[in-house]
């Protein structure tokens, strides 16, 4: 695990070079034997017929988005989600839930099933955290009078502020909600996810996470 933070520092130092950063993230996963192919990004979801309402509420939106992506890809349906927007349009066209689903689908093609399921848990809690803090964060930047704050933030708002919660998520939320989640893995995943958002032009925010900041 010592290599985690050595590599994390390398990511921060080389953050302008997308390929170097991607190599470092996947180099970490490779060293841990986590690279492979999951094949089915719907793997790891609970049985919605028997799970609790709480589980259904937090997992079903992700499941539905991923299923839509798979259907669109299978049918090569260019009119269905996901669309290919220009970089200037991306940040406002995709909701947080869209971005979670896209990230999960991409990762399912690069990691083994057991690690993909861990990433799914990680994203599911990140989503819950953003729903809890999202409107409060947005209020720091604009008046919410015309916003539908009674709805889950992630269902209707873009991903611009997703990196904003990264430290709170690692320090407080994930520890409370899932205390057995390995902190080293969590740091790498949140850094990878936020880096992915930035490089894909889904946010203007950049996040550097190293051990001393957590």
Image (cartoon, rainbow, N blue to C red):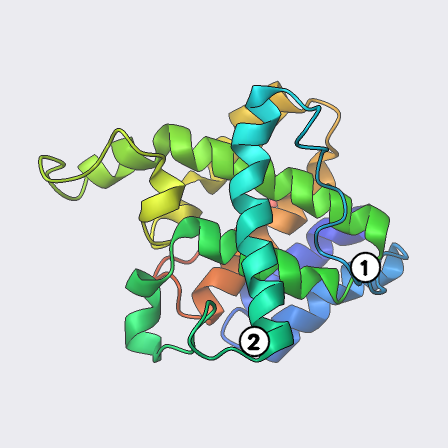
Q: Is residue 148 left or right of residue 12?
A: left
- Camera-side residue of 104 and 6: 104
x and y percentages locating residue 56 in the rendered image: 58, 29
Q: CA distance from mark 2 to mark 1?
A: 24 Å
- Camera-side residue of 176 and 86: 86
Mark 1 nearby-residue class (10 Å; few <14, some 14–19, many ≥20): many
The residue under the point 43% across, 39% down is: 165
The answer to whether 2 is drawn above or below residue 85 in the figure is: above
Mark 2 or mark 1, whichever is nearer to me: 1
Residue at numbered disc 1: 38
Q: Is residue 213 visible?
A: no
User: Looking at the rendering, which quadrant does residue 33 occupy?
Assistant: bottom right
Q: Quadrant of the C terminus?
A: top right
Disc nearer the start of the sequence (2/1) = 2
Q: Is residue 122 left or right of residue 40?
A: left
Mark 2 nearby-residue class (10 Å; few <14, some 14–19, many ≥20): some
Tell me the element at label 2. helix
x and y percentages locating residue 213 in the rendered image: 53, 39
x and y percentages locating residue 159 in the rendered image: 38, 53
- Camera-side residue of 40 and 103: 40
Residue at numbered disc 2: 18
Which residue is at the far right? 33
């Amino acid at each position: 695990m010592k290599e985690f933070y050595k590599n994390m520092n390398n990511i921060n130092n080389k953050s302008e070079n997308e390929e170097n950063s991607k190599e470092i993230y996947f180099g970490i996963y490779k060293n841990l034997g986590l690279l492979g192919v999951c094949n089915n990004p719907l793997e790891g979801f609970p049985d919605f017929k028997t799970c609790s309402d709480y589980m259904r509420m937090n997992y079903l939106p992700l499941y539905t988005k991923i299923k839509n992506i798979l259907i669109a890809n299978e049918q090569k349906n260019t009119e269905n989600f996901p669309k290919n927007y220009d970089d200037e349009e991306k940040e406002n066209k995709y909701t947080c839930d869209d971005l979670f689903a896209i990230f999960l689908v991409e990762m399912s093609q690069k990691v083994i099933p057991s690690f993909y399921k861990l990433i799914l848990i990680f994203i599911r809690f990140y989503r819950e955290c953003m729903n809890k803090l999202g409107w409060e964060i947005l209020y720091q930047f604009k008046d919410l009078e015309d916003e539908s704050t009674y709805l889950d933030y992630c269902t209707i708002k873009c991903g611009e502020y997703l990196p904003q919660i990264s430290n709170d998520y690692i320090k407080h939320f994930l520890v409370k909600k899932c205390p057995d989640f390995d902190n080293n893995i969590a740091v790498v995943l949140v850094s990878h996810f936020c880096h992915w958002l930035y490089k894909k032009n889904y946010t203007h925010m950049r996040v550097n996470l190293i051990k001393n900041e957590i």
